[in-house]
Image (cartoon, coloured by chain):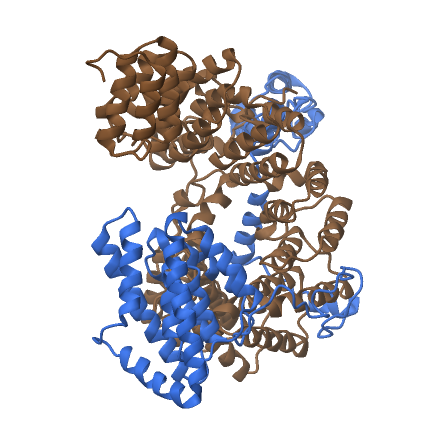
Amino acid sequence: TSNVLSTKKDESTASKDSTTEASSKSQESTAETPKQKLLDIIGNMKVEVSYRKKLQQLKTREIKKQATNKLEGPDGKGSMLQKTTEDTQRGKPLSPELVEAASAVASFLPLNKKQTESELIAQLRRHEETTDKQKKGGSINIRNVISEMAVKRQSPAQRGVRISNRISLELDEDGQRIKPERLSPQSFDSKRSLKVGRRLNIFTKASTETENALRTVSSPTIWDLEFAKEIAAITAQPPRNGFEEMIQWTKEGILWEFPIDNEAGMEDDAEFHEHIFLEKHLEDFPKQGPIRHFMELVICGLSKNPYLSVKQKIEHIEWFQKYFEEKKELLREI
Amino acid sequence: QDPTAAHYMFQDDPFLMPRNAANSRLFSLSKESGRNAAKYIIKQFPQYFDKTFAEPNIPCLMPETLTPQIEGLSEEALKERIHLRRVKDSVDLFDQLIQAGTPVSLETTNSLLDLLCFYGDGESTPGKEDLEEPGVNASEQKVPKREFQRGSQPSGSRWRENNNAERIFKIMPERNADSYCTMIRGMVKHGASAEAYDMYIGLLNERHKADVHTFNALITAVPYLKERFLERWELAKVFLNHMAQQEVQPNLLTFNALLKTLRRCGGVGRSMALLVIKEMEALDIEPSLATYDHLLFILYRGADLCPSGIISEVLDDVGKRSFTPQDPDDANFFATAMQVCCDLKDIKLAYRLNKVMEKGDNWKFLDMDRLNAYWSKFFSLLCMMEQIDVVLKWYKEMSSSLFYPTPKNILDLLQALDAANHLELIPSVWEDMKQLGFNRRQDLLEELLSLMSRERHPDEVQLAFAKCAEEIKAVHEQTRREQSLLEWTGSALGHVALLFSRAGRTQEAWYVNMMEHFQQINRIPTDQVMDEFLNCAKQTNCPDDAIKLVKLAASLGLPSSQRLKNRTEKEFELSEKQK
């Protein structure tokens, strides 16, 4: 599968069509899977029509070569293997067809010729190496290969590779491709629904008593507070009209609450009668005489005073009481 | 309610109403930043704001006092600083206390650890927290997530080795389960998954029990602990089994975290997702929107799509009740669902989804950016699947009020017009494009021009097209200060020339098609253009033009130059000199 993978990648780029087949001619290429055909189509869509013909020629040449190689038999294959292994050594030149194909592509692309050519040849080298590695290596980590390939800078001609990357990213764990036709009966059953099905069977439902027992009383930690804030922020959208805006302002306290509450913000605990009917504080004073008269006037004034709290008024009266007590001796003398 | 009006928050000055998505975002952010600037001023200079005129006092408009009141080395002072979330001060005070030999209680130390783990050793800057409008906040947080690389963890600040939290943890004389739990949560939050796992092992070794939040954090960290799908699932199951053993009841967030992990488990996720849902049901935990979001993502991603059975059921469930937010990921549900509808190319599902969104408070889950994405996808689906008059009706109502069309939307609209043979509406689309600021986008201009010039149209239409072409030409040629010159492409130039010539504006057509012009930009006119010009020259009876044309063709080395020459000779009466 790894070889198929790498060949597929290359095939989706027009230029690499011929070249990869050249490099993989010594390896056993599997039969054309439907996915290969699909990638072929996609890759070819990216290719300009003008040089398709040339590639066809190259392709037919390679296929012929491949056929002859297969005829050679396993021994010949072995020797071919050797040769390509040598070829893929760094520094050794690639086979001339590859170079020719690369230059053909470069000449048709409107970009900088030399640069494209060198890029293509470098890419070919890399492909040879990776196919080689995968040939030798035991367990293949496809993911590394793919991720590595995805990261490289791609010239526009190689966008097809990216498309095949995206498709082949749906790998099962051990590298087996998920084929569109193969639907495992368990996972993709069309009768699948939310209502029927098995469950994990890991947890059991706790009875309510244990739930209550487990609920520990602790002040909300910073985690809880921040989480609550985050949750509230999800649905906090800006107001859609003036009414919503006013609602928001009322909640924040910017706007008064309607109907207006006159006592909003005042913390007076006392009722009105405690403010006005202050006579009960006069019990300690003499019942007759100028002091009483005076005190009654004081009480009258206090009862009309909205600015003092009840406590303050009582303190006021007590002050008077103390004062008069002190002066009692003085007055007695008079 | 006026369906074509912009959002309420923009209704101030008609000139300042945003015309495209970028502007709307900019305006809403600027409004919010103005508010924040005011808040900042009040906070920084409270001394100027100490007159309380209002009776009763309006506390939220007054500056807050955030300075710690208790001075001196005491546990009370430490507690106060922790409460005020002053990270650095708390750490310093704690160190001083330890050095002075005063024991700090376990509870206080734990709350200090809480503070440190939550902020990851950075400072908590109150200004930054409410930098964005809460609705826009979610989209801001999405931006770092887009730079997500495989294998690395997106996080705000990263967990440094041996930072204050770890240091304090190590020097604690005794630790209880809470200490471990908060450390684990902090580590997971800031990207130190492996350390979190080690800490968890430590917790197990001490025979403590973790709480449900810790387990949730551990489950979210699973994708960063293991690479292979099956291993991830196994590890998650290990955590779940521990939970069951330690008799910790899972909650909604546990299952959501589990599904979030399964999102990154490929095929394994697909097989296991429904089992998780059934487990939730068995425990009587109501799924939230985030649950459905994860489910849809797992089942409908990728090349092979599930049939639409599941999403129908999901929509049924969601449509039955109005949701309250329970998970930060709830907001993604509608976008994912609409994406699935688009992938399945099912317009009826999309209509159902719209109904669900309008039910109760569900609309609140879509903030400004998500709303735009949602309606944008819906519009693309409409263009693909519906008749043109329905499309146009939606378009008139929706653009600039519900969403701002993206370039893709405009392309889809053009294609829909093409399919319905209503190409005469193209000039009005061009007007919209100008308003949206797309008039310099190469791909859109190409599409527009090619559609206009493909066939001949009745004359008024042709005139309107030519006017568009003229404006497009102007766009190409003007260089404003910061904008770079828009390059002509060969086809664009050809189309413009065609349109001009068809409308009888030959003078301009020639100007456009000046030999130098074409050669200047190294482009080659197509045969169609050359033929059209010849026709044009014939109409205006101008053999000189025809000769100029032939000369141009020859100089560019076109294969059709011979043919043109023949035609010219046949159709025009040329004087000897001209021959």
Q: Foreground residue, A325 or B330?
A: B330
Is any atom of residue A190 visible in this view? Answer: yes
For residue B543, what is the image quadrant? top left
Is any atom of residue B521 visible in this view? Answer: no
- Horizontal placement of B540 versus A206: left or right? left
The total of numbered circles placed on residues is 0
- Horizontal placement of A177 versus B43: left or right? right
Quadrant occupied by the N terminus of chain B: top right
Colour brown maps to chain = B
* Chain A colour as displayed: blue
Q: Foreground residue, A54 or A319?
A: A54
Q: Foreground residue, B441 or B223?
A: B441
**Residue B124 appears at what percent x and percent y?**
39, 51
For residue B365, what is the image quadrant? top right
**Residue B429 appears at what percent x and percent y?**
50, 23
**Residue A63 appears at what percent x and percent y?**
43, 70
**Residue A196 appears at what percent x and percent y?**
80, 64
Please report the residue visible at 54 percent of the width from the left and 19 percent of the height from the top: B424
Quadrant occupied by the C terminus of chain B: top left
- Horizontal placement of B290 versus B224: left or right? right
Give the residue furthest to the top.
Answer: B541
Q: Is residue B332 above or below residue A69?
A: above
For residue B399, what is the image quadrant? top right
